[in-house]
Image (cartoon, grey):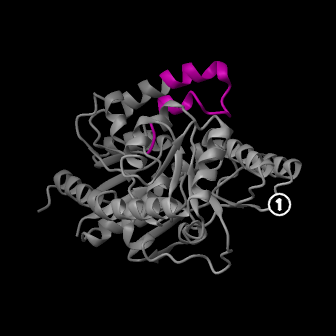
Amino acid sequence: MKKICILTSVHIPFDVRIFFKEAKSLAKAGYDVTLIAQHDNDEVVDGIKIISLRLPRNRIERMTKTAWSVFWKALKVDADIYHLHDPELMPIGLILKSLGKKIIYDMHENLPKQIKNKHWINPRLRQFLSMAVYWSERVSLKGTPVIFAEHSYRKDYPWVKEFETILNMPLVSQLLCIEPHASARQGFSVGYLGRVGLERGSTMIIEALKILKDRGITPRYDCIGPITESHKHDLLRRCKQYRLSDVAIHGYMPAYKGWEVIKQCSVGLALLHPIPNYVDSYPTKIFEYMALGIPVVASDFPLYREIVEGNDCGLCVDPLQPESIAEAISRLMMNPKIARRMGENGRQAVMDKYNWSVEEKKLCEFYKKLLGTP
């Protein structure tokens, strides 16, 4: 049995793409799968061996001490192939290659483009760091098979010779059986699922809710996903200022619990700002909303419009205009039959074509090719 070792110093072990999609698909295909990630203890879950990493105190420690811990633990596994998920592990990948190990790099984002919008990096340094990362990737990934999470990444990495695009499509088998959360409320509500931040539309959503309140419309809002304490404080301050009482900022939830809450919502929001990495990438949340049977209000980018309007499963708006967001929410609220039809259309589209089973086949075929297994 071929041994696969999946490495991440950044993500939690039960990250949906890493654990529930890729690791479980590879285990189902007959591989011996080990996952090294930040966790409380070593354990085996669904046949996947999890080797724990100590939680780092800060980003610097994670990129140094934690990364080296990944390396030493990975060596002990002695896998046939190592599957890396984080840019900071690329030096580790180089060392593994020098020792004769096979590696795959899973590119979750176009990092040189993304750096230009990292708020925690000094704006004067972003262009320089973007170029530095681009050239370090060229060196680190030379001759390395790459998994692209988006089709758009390929055009910026023409020098990658061996690759496959594995889109982050939803696990239909899990999503279709989700029931609303036990505390589900009656009435109209909107929901957001994913990392919470300015560039992901968090503030614009609150502004749109204020506009609706001024019109006498007060939907409940459930915001689910990782959020910094400072940003959470800012959003709650705005809610208090605008007297928005029916807003719940839940923070991080395990995927299935988040899906339970979103399932009770009337509309799912995907209002990412027009920065390069978002404009060219599919947001997984759109497909999750579709699978859960609720209509979508999404940013009016060509890639999103192709999915949302192409399948008549929601509305596309300018994500920088709270008035447009409010108008779309109001339209769906005032037209429940249209909203219900859009939700049904989205669910059917996910069942037919936008689902992980399609990507799973590509993943397994890529592994067979790299390992030379029948």
- Estimate the x, y position of residue 331 in percent, counting from the top left: 59, 51
Q: Quadrant of residue 305?
A: top left
In the image, 287: left or right of 373?
right
- Estimate the x, y position of residue 362 in percent, counting from the top left: 24, 55
Can residue 369 be seen in the rendering of this structure? yes
In the displayed structure, 130 sits above or below 145; it is: above
Q: Which residues are magenta?
A: 108-131
Residue highlighted by disc 1: 245
- Estimate the x, y position of residue 220 in percent, counting from the top left: 71, 62
- Name the residue located 81 percent from the left edge and 55 percent from the top edge: 244
- Name the residue located 71 percent from the left edge and 60 percent from the top edge: 219
Residue 121 lies in the magenta-colored region: yes
- Name the residue located 38 percent from the left edge and 56 percent from the top edge: 169
Circle 1 SS class: loop
Count of marks, rendered view: 1
In the image, 310: left or right of 334?
left
Looking at the image, the residue that sits furthest to the bottom is 182
In the displayed structure, 117 sits above or below 81; it is: above
Assign the N terminus to one quadrant of the image.
bottom left
Q: Quadrant of residue 60?
A: top right
In the displayed structure, 358 sits above or below 208; it is: below
Assign the C terminus to one quadrant of the image.
bottom left
Crowd tier of the residue under label 1, counting other residues whose Cα lies within 10 Å: few below 14, some 14–19, many 20 or above: few
- Name the residue located 44 percent from the left edge and 77 percent from the top edge: 177
Q: Amino acid at mark 1?
A: Ser
- Estimate the x, y position of residue 282 in percent, counting from the top left: 43, 45
